[in-house]
Amino acid sequence: MTLDKVKKGQVVKITGIPNEMVRVQAIRFGISEGTVVVCREVVPAGPVVVARNKQEIAIGRSLARTILVEPC
């Protein structure tokens, strides 16, 4: 499953970021493989807002489509 398919309130673990450029962008946001995040909001045709610790991060839909996750 990819991050753009996650529902609001769902807790997921990042399992893969296949593209090197996307991985670099995700690391800048503090997201890497193995990170557990909570989906705070899914804006229709917009970003996916996830929370890690006390930080909320809006991830663009196209970037979210490339991040692999699994439910926790």
Image (cartoon, helix red, strand yellow):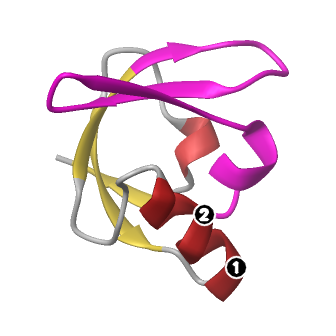
**Image spot of residue 40 (x, y percent):** 40, 15
Residue furthest to the right: 45
Secondary structure state at the residue bearing disc 2: helix
Confirm whether the magenta stretch covers residue 25. no
Residue furthest to the front: 28
Could you tell me if the residues under marks 1 and 2 are in contact, i.e. CB atoms within 8 Å? yes
The residue where tag 1 is placed is 21
- 23 on left or right of 50: right
Q: Can residue 19 be seen in this view?
A: no
**Image spot of residue 60 (x, y percent):** 72, 38
Secondary structure state at the residue bearing disc 1: helix
* Residue found 69% across the figure and 26% down from its top: 47
Q: Tell me the distance, in whole angstroms, between the alpha carbons under discs 1 and 2.
A: 6 Å
Q: In this view, does 30 lie above or below 56?
A: below
Task: Give the residues drawn in magenta, as a range.
Answer: 40-68
Identify the amino acid type marked 2: Gln
**Image spot of residue 4 (x, y percent):** 63, 40
